[in-house]
Image (tube, rainbow, N blue to C red):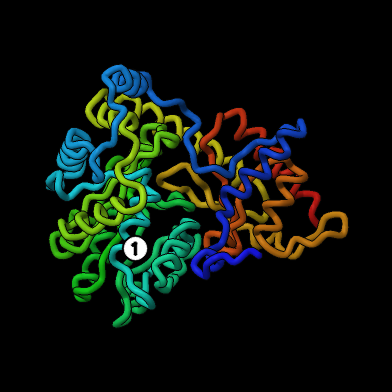
Amino acid sequence: MELLSARLTALSPSETFAMAQKSNELKAQGIDVINMSVGEPDFTTPVHIKEAAKQAIDDNFSFYSPVAGFPDLKKAVCEKLKNENDLEYTPAQIVVSGGAKQSLCNVILSIVDKDEEVIIPAPYWVSYPEMVKLAEGRSVFIYAGIEKEFKITPQQLEDAITPRTKALILCSPSNPTGSVYTRDELQALADVLEKHKNVYVVADEIYEHINYIGKHESMAQFDNIRDRVIVVNGVSKGYAMTGWRIGWIAAPQWIASACSMLQGQYTSGPSSISQKAAVAAYTGDQSCVTEMREAFERRRDLIVNLLGQIPGLKVNNPMGAFYIFPECAGYLGKSYNGKKINTATDLAMYLLEVAHVACVGGDAFGAPGCIRISYATSDENITKAIARIAAALEKLI
């Protein structure tokens, strides 16, 4: 008899991983699938970072690390925050975890109580609401469509706040839309939050280094709310280190201490070798970050141009990350071989089966009229994939 906990049965499986798995299953059958469903750079980890990891092995960094991370990595994070973001943190305010996903979950589990509300702008990353469920909180969604570049307004935020609101999760640059909030837009949101002293901001900045506006703007820069902002970041996206599993938070001391205590009970410190690699990422040559960002920007321009030529798709010009989130509502309700496309998830499955291109339906991101396409792949794959998508969409009647 299988009796899972109510906590687990309430969770939904990750749609992004599910689509990636289906893509791999087709590939295993010999089908040429172009996978544009996964949020992962296609670059390999830079050589100097890999060399640091090899050196760490030779130097016998094979024992448990401190729960909140090695001191040299926490110091490197503080220096990065000072040099790149003009933010002052002490190493005691940094907690290193097994990826930014764990960092986010640590924060939510540490500050959110049963039935407290967490405001999540939609479209949102699939795991945010599930993490709130784990904390027994309630997600409150604010929707912003493509006509607003998928960015919420101060008035929408004000209207969503209630006496039970505990936190706002804000992701900029955004997964799944690639939208980037400007300094003025963040300032306007901060001015709303200033009036609500019990509301915290979980600032997911994992795509910081992949932005096309020149400079990342952090929610933590505003003095009027600084003591209520928790920055979440890591090395996965900017340094092509997804599998190394290193993320971190920069937070008020009491929140950092709480996250460290929580982490100490269920995972302890993250990989010692990965941490030494992360030190090299932050303290070494940064030209790799620039080169990857320039490649992503070129690919962004290519995919925006190609998708913009497909009738019935609404496409914007995202300013960061490596996703595009076209509105495809015009294709919903159409059919192929008698099978009706009712949802964006249906459309994504159709594109996988007919075009052999894997993307993810917007239903999983709180945007049922859109699909998410990752352009973290080669120019050749992008060109081929969009041609396949265009041909498949033409077949719908």
**Relative height, residue 188 to residue 56 (above, below):** below
Please name whichever residue, 271 or 244, is drawn nearer the observer in this view of the structure: 271
Residue 337: give x, y in percent of width and height. 87, 55
- Name which residue type carries label 1: Leu
Q: Residue furthest right?
A: 337
Residue at 36 percent of width and 22 percent of height: 50
Q: Which image quadrant is residue 221 in?
A: bottom left
Residue 31 in view of the camera: yes
Name the side, left or right, on which 32 lies relative to 109. Answer: right
**Relative height, residue 246 to residue 332 (above, below):** above
Name the side, left or right, on which 239 lies relative to 362. Answer: left
Please name whichever residue, 250 or 123, is drawn nearer the observer in this view of the structure: 250
Name the side, left or right, on which 107 lies relative to 303. Answer: left
Residue 121: give x, y in percent of width and height. 42, 65
Residue at 40 percent of width and 72 percent of height: 137
Residue of label 1: 109
Q: Which residue lies furthest to the front in this view?
A: 1
Residue at 60 percent of width and 51 percent of height: 360
Residue 260: give x, y in percent of width and height. 24, 52
Residue 208 in view of the camera: no
Image quadrant where one finds the C terminus: bottom right
Q: Which image quadrant is residue 235 in?
A: top left
Please name whichever residue, 249 or 55, is drawn nearer the observer in this view of the structure: 55
